[in-house]
């Protein structure tokens, strides 16, 4: 990825961006723990072309549209329709004090993003500001320099700054989603950006490939493939394509990386019944984690790696259990329903999402890690399975058959704003959200 030179304009005391408003504020605009969160009305007019040449004008429009779509994806904002705007930034100021705030507050816009683009050859300079229209002050001001082709990266970086300012975390804009698709005639693993863009196929096994799982640094993916005729576990570095294979007798499946460690849990059956084992990143067995009659599978770690959720039929039907890794004590988490699988521990550590069979259909549910507060997030719309949390804990990606063929959908952590992420040939299943790279 190209390096983009970022000038922190406020810290460098550039006159166009007053420094006082580029510093972090004490006020938290968005309470991310509130299930009834109110969306903030946000206006994003077309950015200003500084030289008014056709290429620059089109770039400015495209960049502002990308920023609107990116922030809308989070579920935090109500994007105001541009058709309602009373002001055109091409003929007005984009910085305080030249902004007519009444033109924006009369529309109900509480936040305003303005920008100005300058292009010389392939060189791009883009100034972006987040403004509180009611307080009439700038909250963030940045100037970015790079190539025209860096537009997407620049916009995502500024969106990360906005989300960090408003919520205290960096959001999802540097994350990716792995999933399984059979569009080639075989189930292969693909990776796309957080918003479904830039999809690429990363396995070419010409065989069933399932259960992608990201390492904590996003550099490795583990998955199960029938490439050799049976379910073996593959551990692959995405940058240099190094591979390790766990091919013990029986099944080798459902990998889950240990947070902060180059180690993972997986289900192996070489000793008889499928149990969960802890492996090194190279695939060597460290220890056996579960040992009980029946099937133990689908591990998922708490963010601090002190506990592990997993599925077991030791009580007669598949249910979710939690093991304390220090005390080795195991407790049952789910009691409602007779078929609960695919646990996914939230990055905040307080909740576990899972797939529950209800009335012959699978739906996504969320339950507190203490067993309290069970909530069903999907209902009445096909089978909904394989939940995976965004790195900030605000969104859940999952697969659903509500359209007929299985598709990848995204919703907020409270079940609202359910929408399709992408559409490809064939069916898409088994989504897994990567960690976020953050912003440096």
Image (cartoon, rainbow, N blue to C red):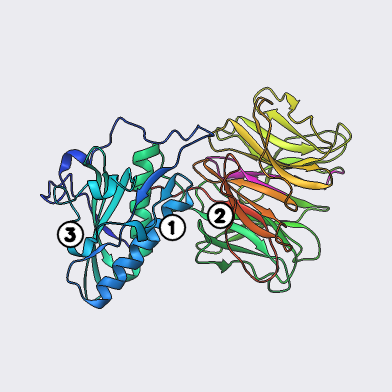
> What residue is pinned by disc 2?
220
- Closer to the camera in the image, 132 or 366: 132
Single out the mark in the foreground, 2 or 3: 3
Please say if 370 is above or below 256.
Answer: above
Q: Does the magenta stretch include residue 225?
A: no
> What residue is pinned by disc 3?
92
Single out the mark in the foreground, 3 or 1: 3
- Closer to the camera in the image, 377 or 209: 377
Q: Distance between the residues labelled 2 and 3?
A: 48 Å
Q: Check if mark 2's residue and mark 3's residue have beta carbons within 8 Å.
A: no
Say few, some or many: other residues with alpha carbon within 10 Å of mark 2 (under 14 / 14 to 19 / 20 or more): many
The local secondary structure at tag 3 comes to: loop
- Closer to the camera in the image, 284 or 268: 268
The local secondary structure at tag 2 comes to: strand
Instruction: Identify the residue at image location x=20%, y=55%.
Output: 94
Q: In which quarter of the image is residue 346?
A: top right
Is residue 82 left or right of 93 when viewed as pictured?
Answer: right
Which residue is at the far left? Answer: 15
Instruction: Identify the residue at image location x=81%, y=65%.
Output: 229
Going from N to C along the chain, the mark reached first, 2 or 1, is: 1
Going from N to C along the chain, the mark reached first, 3 or 1, is: 1
Q: Residue 69 carries which label?
A: 1
- Closer to the camera in the image, 109 or 113: 109
């Amino acid at each position: 990825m190209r390096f983009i030179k970022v000038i922190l304009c406020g810290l460098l005391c550039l006159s166009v961006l007053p420094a006082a408003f580029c510093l972090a504020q004490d006020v938290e605009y968005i309470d991310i723990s509130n299930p009834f969160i109110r969306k903030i009305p946000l206006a994003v007019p077309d950015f200003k072309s500084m030289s008014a040449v056709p290429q620059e004008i089109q770039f400015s429009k495209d960049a502002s549209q990308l920023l609107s779509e990116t922030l809308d994806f989070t579920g935090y904002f109500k994007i105001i329709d541009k058709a309602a705007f009373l002001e055109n930034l091409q003929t007005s100021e984009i910085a305080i004090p030249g902004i007519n705030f009444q033109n924006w507050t009369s529309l109900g816009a509480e936040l305003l993003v303005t920008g100005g683009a300058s292009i010389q050859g392939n060189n791009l300079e883009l100034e972006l500001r987040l403004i509180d229209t009611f307080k009439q002050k700038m909250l963030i001001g940045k100037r970015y320099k790079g190539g025209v082709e860096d537009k997407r990266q620049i916009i995502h970086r500024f969106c990360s700054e906005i989300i960090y300012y408003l919520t205290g975390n960096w959001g999802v804009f540097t994350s990716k989603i792995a999933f399984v698709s059979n569009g080639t005639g075989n189930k292969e693993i693909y990776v796309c950006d957080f918003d479904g863009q830039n999809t690429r196929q990363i396995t070419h096994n010409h065989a069933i490939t399932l259960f992608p799982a990201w390492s904590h640094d996003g550099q490795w993916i583990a998955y199960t493939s029938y490439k050799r005729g049976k379910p073996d576990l593959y551990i692959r570095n995405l940058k240099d394509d190094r591979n390790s294979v766990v091919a013990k007798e029986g099944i080798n499946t459902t990998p889950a990386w240990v947070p902060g460690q180059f180690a993972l849990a997986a289900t192996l059956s070489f000793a008889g019944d499928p149990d969960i084992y802890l492996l090194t990143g190279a695939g060597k067995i460290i220890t056996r984690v579960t040992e009980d009659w029946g099937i133990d599978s689908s591990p998922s770690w708490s963010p601090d790696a002190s506990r592990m959720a997993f599925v077991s039929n030791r009580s007669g039907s598949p249910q979710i259990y939690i093991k304390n890794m220090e005390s080795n004590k195991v407790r049952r988490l789910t009691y409602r329903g007779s078929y609960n699988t695919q646990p996914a521990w939230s990055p905040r550590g307080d909740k576990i999402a899972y797939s529950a069979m209800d009335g012959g259909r699978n739906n996504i549910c969320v339950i507190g890690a203490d067993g309290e507060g069970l909530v069903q997030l999907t209902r009445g719309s096909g089978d909904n399975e394989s939940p995976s949390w965004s790195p900030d804990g605000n969104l859940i990606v999952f697969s659903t058959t509500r359209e007929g063929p299985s598709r990848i959908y995204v919703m907020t952590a409270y079940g609202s704003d359910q929408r399709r992420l992408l559409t490809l040939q064939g069916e898409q299943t088994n989504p897994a959200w990567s960690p976020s790279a953050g912003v440096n």
